[in-house]
Image (cartoon, rainbow, N blue to C red):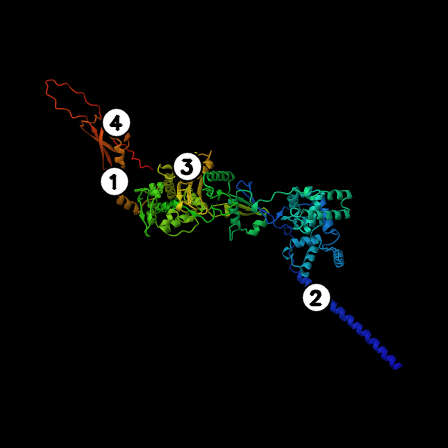
């Protein structure tokens, strides 16, 4: 018996020891498990983002763009509608209370994570009730801001990171600060982030002035911003609004009367929807504004902004645009469009030569019909307006604009084709200056062959043209594409006396913190002298004849205030494009009209009226500014002498023909009338008897070595008189009119 008792006692003690060992082992495993979990949690939360700056909770601020007057709003660029508030005092108490009652009733009791709320949500969800979430307002704020990139990551790791950040946030900010940050960042549908943006969007009131029914409607939206958008689903939004009102009543924040009255208001009657934002955020002058937007978002741009910066960074952008000049450009283009067929349109760029500021820009008839910007994109064949660059090259190489050039028709090209002047007019041998005025194609082709295409392309690039060109003489006729922006900029270099100012459309950019991010005055390209003042002056003198010579292609079409101008017309092949690019000292303008689809137009169509209309509007009421006087460059190119010797005889013959035509008009006139007609010419006369022409009348004329010689009648030849002893004395005849040549040279029509 004793032996069996001893055995039982031994087994009992062994079982106790086994239980003790098992319990110890379990505790060890549990401890290790807890340590492992804590280690994992510590690892998950080791790289949490900083909460030290409230900028983390103020995403996607809109950037605004203004004209040069710094008040005309051109555009607002934003991914979201936001208008963050600075204080909870700017929010209706109904919003503050309703948000807490609906989203996180224990908000003022927990420390970032609501453990009882989590337990309640689990029980309700397991019991088959309506699904509930347990995220606090603080957790939602964290998820939608600093952890926004992880918001769609449904995992324990994200939940742990979110919870830790929520607890940390509650230690750094007060409850009221957290609630305001939440209200400034939460999604209220229709692109609205923040209570102020939502209030303005749906009811056109401030967040402070929301009524109870309006506030409840907004408080309910964040549960499902797309489905509960009152614009799209007013019935669903109203149903959710009533749930919010029920919870506010349960929480004791509104009375039964207030609850019932608010629920009785039909949501659709309560809504006062704000107008839709303009397309692409552009409020005014879309061709210019979109051009600036594209500059800001281009890769490797000099402004230091990216696409994301522009649409999220809260920048203020100031531009060079002059609203008054832009309105005049728009009006001139509209008037031109009204004068043309519907498929034709106009484009115009105006630049201030002294700064490069783009003052006005029109890229077509209707931006929202066709957003391709003719003023800045792709370019168009410039026609003869490109000849100005060939002219500048020739003058820089020492070729005098008075040098003779062959402008006869046709010119046989190397490929066997014939090149003709416009209208097949034979302009003969004339000066380069006069060839410019009439825009002789054959003359300028021959001049291009002399100065070389490579040198002319270099000149165009130095002056401000950015396009690439084929190195063939034919480019002097503007066969390659250039934008109106580049043409206005290049001609502005002539106007500035040879100093190139790159086009400036963006003058200053200010960050949301008030710091200057970009300033064209200090960060832009420095002005660069690209041709001498003398060369620029000589180009201007020659291009003035386009407007001032009676044979010029824009004769008499300068500004209405009498401002002297210089420039060049141009017509594309098949009459697809028509240009006038010209300048005064204070403004350069490129005007273009045509069919953007490269269809042929009327050959009589010209851009002259558009250019003149705009420049007259732009300079109306301003003082006339003379072009500066400049010395002539040194014209030492042997081409000058070679051409003079080559065409001396032909030139004299041409002059003799002109003189003969002028002198022919004197036949039949009295000597005094002939003298008046030929005043200024080198004239002499001889006399001879004529039985048919009265004395003192011009019988005939001839031209000898550049001098007009008139033959004047002495009347009938007298019969020999019979001698008489006392002849009657005859009075002396009156002296003939003075036909000494005037020191002024004969006019040449320029």
Name the residue located 73 percent from the left edge and 52 percent from the top edge. Answer: 104
In the picture, the disc for residue 36 is: 2
Quadrant in the picture for the N terminus:
bottom right
Marks 2 and 3, how far apart at CA? 87 Å
Mark yes or no: residue 658 visible.
yes
Marks 1 and 3, how far apart at CA? 35 Å
Q: Which of marks 1 and 4 is nearer the N terminus?
A: 1
Name the residue located 15 percent from the left edge and 19 percent from the top edge. Answer: 729
Looking at the image, residue 595 lies above or below residue 40: above
Tell how many labels: 4
Q: State if disc 3 and disc 2 touch (CB < 8 Å).
A: no
Q: Is residue 21 left or right of residue 620?
A: right
In the picture, the disc for residue 672 is: 4
Q: Which of marks 4 and 2 is in front?
A: 4
Q: Nearer the viewer, mark 2 or mark 1?
A: 1
Neighbourhood count class around disc 2 (C-alpha, 10 Å): few under 14, some 14–19, many 20 upward: few
Q: Name the residue under label 3.
A: 558
Q: Which of marks 1 and 3 is nearer the N terminus?
A: 3
Q: State if disc 4 and disc 3 touch (CB < 8 Å).
A: no
Q: Mark 1 points at which residue?
A: 653
Q: Residue 271: percent from the left, percent from the top?
A: 67, 43
Q: Which of marks 2 and 3 is nearer the N terminus?
A: 2
Q: Which of marks 2 and 3 is in front?
A: 3
Q: State if disc 1 and disc 2 touch (CB < 8 Å).
A: no
């Amino acid at each position: 018996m004793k032996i069996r008792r001893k055995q039982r006692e031994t087994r009992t003690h062994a079982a106790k020891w086994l239980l003790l060992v098992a319990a110890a082992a379990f505790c060890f495993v549990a401890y290790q498990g807890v340590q492992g979990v804590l280690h994992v949690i510590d690892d998950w939360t080791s790289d949490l983002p900083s909460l030290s700056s409230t900028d983390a909770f103020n995403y996607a601020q809109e950037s605004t763009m203004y004209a040069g007057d710094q008040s005309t709003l051109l555009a607002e660029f934003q991914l979201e509608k936001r208008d963050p508030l600075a204080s909870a005092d700017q929010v209706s108490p109904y919003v503050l209370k309703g948000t807490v009652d609906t989203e996180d009733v224990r908000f003022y009791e927990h420390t970032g994570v609501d453990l009882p709320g989590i337990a309640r949500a689990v029980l309700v969800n397991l019991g088959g009730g309506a699904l509930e979430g347990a995220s606090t307002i603080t957790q939602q704020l964290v998820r939608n801001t600093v952890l926004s990139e992880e918001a769609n990551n449904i995992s324990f790791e994200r939940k742990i990171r979110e919870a830790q950040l929520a607890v940390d946030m509650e230690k750094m900010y007060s409850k009221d600060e957290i609630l305001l940050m939440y209200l400034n960042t939460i999604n209220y549908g229709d692109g609205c982030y923040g209570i102020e943006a939502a209030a303005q969007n749906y009811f056109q009131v401030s967040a402070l002035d929301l009524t109870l029914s309006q506030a409840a409607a907004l408080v309910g939206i964040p549960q499902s911003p797309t489905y509960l958008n009152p614009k799209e689903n007013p019935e669903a939004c109203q149903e959710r609004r009533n749930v919010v009102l029920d919870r506010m009543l349960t929480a004791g924040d509104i009375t039964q009367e207030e609850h019932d009255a608010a629920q009785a208001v039909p949501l659709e009657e309560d809504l006062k929807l704000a107008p839709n934002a303009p397309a692409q955020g552009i409020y005014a002058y879309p061709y210019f504004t979109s051009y600036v937007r594209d500059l800001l978002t281009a890769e490797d741009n000099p402004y230091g902004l990216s696409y994301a910066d522009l649409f999220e960074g809260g920048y203020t952008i100031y531009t060079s645009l002059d609203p008054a000049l832009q309105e005049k450009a728009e009006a001139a283009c509209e008037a031109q469009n009204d004068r043309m067929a519907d498929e034709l349109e106009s484009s115009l760029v105006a630049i201030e030569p002294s700064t490069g500021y783009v003052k006005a820009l029109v890229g077509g008839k209707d931006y929202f019909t066709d957003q391709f910007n003719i003023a800045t994109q792709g370019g168009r064949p410039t026609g003869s307006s490109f000849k100005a660059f060939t002219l500048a090259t020739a003058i820089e190489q020492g070729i005098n604009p008075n040098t003779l050039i062959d402008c006869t028709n046709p010119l046989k090209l190397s490929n066997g084709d014939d090149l003709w002047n416009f209208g097949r007019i034979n302009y003969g041998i004339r000066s380069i200056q006069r060839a410019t005025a009439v825009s002789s194609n054959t003359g300028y082709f021959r001049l291009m062959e002399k100065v070389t295409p490579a040198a002319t392309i270099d000149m165009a690039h130095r002056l401000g043209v950015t396009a690439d060109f084929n190195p063939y003489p034919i480019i002097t006729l503007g066969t390659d594409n250039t934008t109106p922006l580049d043409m206005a900029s290049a001609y502005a270099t002539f106007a500035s006396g040879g100093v190139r100012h790159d086009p400036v459309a963006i003058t200053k950019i200010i960050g949301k913190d008030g710091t200057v991010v970009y300033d064209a005055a200090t960060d832009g390209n420095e002005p660069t002298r690209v041709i001498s003042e003398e060369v620029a002056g000589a180009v201007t003198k020659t291009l003035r004849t386009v407007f001032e010579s009676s044979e010029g292609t824009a004769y008499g079409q300068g500004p209405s205030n009498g401002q002297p101008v210089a420039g060049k017309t141009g017509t594309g092949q098949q009459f697809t494009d028509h240009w006038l690019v010209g300048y005064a000292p204070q403004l350069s303008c490129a005007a273009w009209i045509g069919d953007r689809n490269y269809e042929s137009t009327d050959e009589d169509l010209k851009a002259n009226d558009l250019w003149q209309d705009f420049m007259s509007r732009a300079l109306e009421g301003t003082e006339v500014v003379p072009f500066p006087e400049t010395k002539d460059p040194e014209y030492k190119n042997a081409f000058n002498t070679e051409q003079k010797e080559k065409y001396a005889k032909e030139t004299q013959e041409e002059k003799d023909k002109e003189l003969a035509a002028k002198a022919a008009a004197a036949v039949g006139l009295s000597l005094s009338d002939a003298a008046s007609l030929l005043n200024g010419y080198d004239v002499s006369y001889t006399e001879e008897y004529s039985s048919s022409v009265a004395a003192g009348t011009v019988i005939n004329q001839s031209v000898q070595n550049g001098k007009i010689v008139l033959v004047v009648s002495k009347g009938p030849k007298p019969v020999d008189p019979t001698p008489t002893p006392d002849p009657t004395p005859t009075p002396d005849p009156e002296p003939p009119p003075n036909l000494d040549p005037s020191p002024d040279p004969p006019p040449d029509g320029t």
